Amino acid sequence: MEKKDKLVSDLTNSLNQIKSLINEHQWDINKNRELWNKMVDDASELHKLVKPTHHKYMIQNRRVSPDEREFYNHIHPVEDLLRFIKDPHANDDPEDQTINHEFEIKIYSRRWEHDDIYHIKRIEDGWEVLHLTLSGVCDKSGRPYIFENLRQDSINYPEALPGYLEWLWEKSAETGLTHEQVQLSLNELGNWISACEKTSPTGIWETYK
């Protein structure tokens, strides 16, 4: 048996044993350290032989180079390595389909008692706000101009909104979301903002914001 084939076989067996122990709630790193280290060592050695590609997000998440042993100190990159050996295109990143596409976010305004349309473009490193008083380039979380426009119109919005916008930008790049998928996701965020705005306290609070 060639060295590569033996490493693939050993690595597959180690990975299956580890996953089985985890699924059966019997995993204990202290009791199974030898098995874990063998998986990491075999994966690192196999990496040198096959020189695999990995998803961009996998490399970002591991925060070390795939050429380093530490990269394989986790189940997911080991799974990706074995997938690559079966199919050299298994870890190819999908094409980012929506860079420079324009989208809309419909947001209700208590101040004007109707929906406003925010026009934004998904650009290389974030979003760009278009056709509004406060227009310009934003980061992936929509800062600063999406939120400056919301504040200018006294619109209440969910505190977690920046994180959702950033997550949508990253997912669009990682999974190649279509224009329609991004727009539907922004529709959901617009509905969420509008629901927050519509349920703002009334009465004495109306003069607050």
Image (cartoon, grey):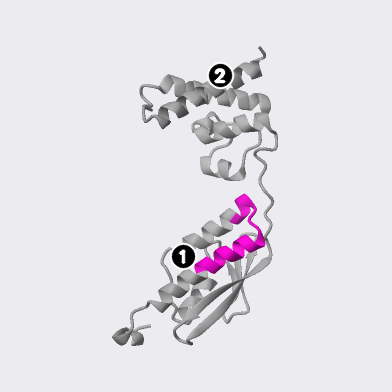
Q: Tell me which secondary structure the magenta stretch mostly adopts.
A: helix
Q: Residue furthest top?
A: 1
Snapshot quadrant of residue 1 = top right
Snapshot quadrant of residue 21 = top left
Q: Is residue 199 magenta?
A: no
On residue 177, the disc is none
- Mark 2 neighbour class, 10 Å CA radius: few under 14, some 14 to 19, many 20 or more: some
The vertical placement of 77 against 132, above or below, is above
Which residue is drawn at the image coordinates 46% and 65% (left, top)? 161
| Alpha carbon distance from label 2 to label 1 | 46 Å
Judge by depth and name the residue closer to the eye, 23 or 190. 23
The vertical placement of 31 against 109, above or below, is above
Which residue is drawn at the image coordinates 32% and 83% (left, top)? 205
Classify mark 2: helix, strand or loop.
Answer: helix
- Mark 1 neighbour class, 10 Å CA radius: few under 14, some 14 to 19, many 20 or more: some
Where does residue 158 sit, x and y in percent of width and height? 42, 68
Q: Left of 189 or right of it: where is 1?
A: right
Q: Left of 123 or right of it: where is 187?
A: left
Judge by depth and name the residue closer to the eye, 61 or 65. 61
Amino acid type, residue under disc 1 in the picture: Leu
Q: Which residue is mark 2?
A: 10
On residue 161, the disc is 1
Circle nearer the N terminus (2, 1): 2
Q: Quadrant of the C terminus?
A: bottom left
| Residue 143 visible in the picture | no
Instruction: Please report the bounds of the magenta region as a residue range.
Output: 172-189
Q: Residue furthest front?
A: 24
Q: Is residue 185 magenta?
A: yes
| Residue 158 visible in the picture | yes
Where does residue 192 sit, x and y in percent of width and height? 46, 69
Amino acid type, residue under disc 2 in the picture: Asp
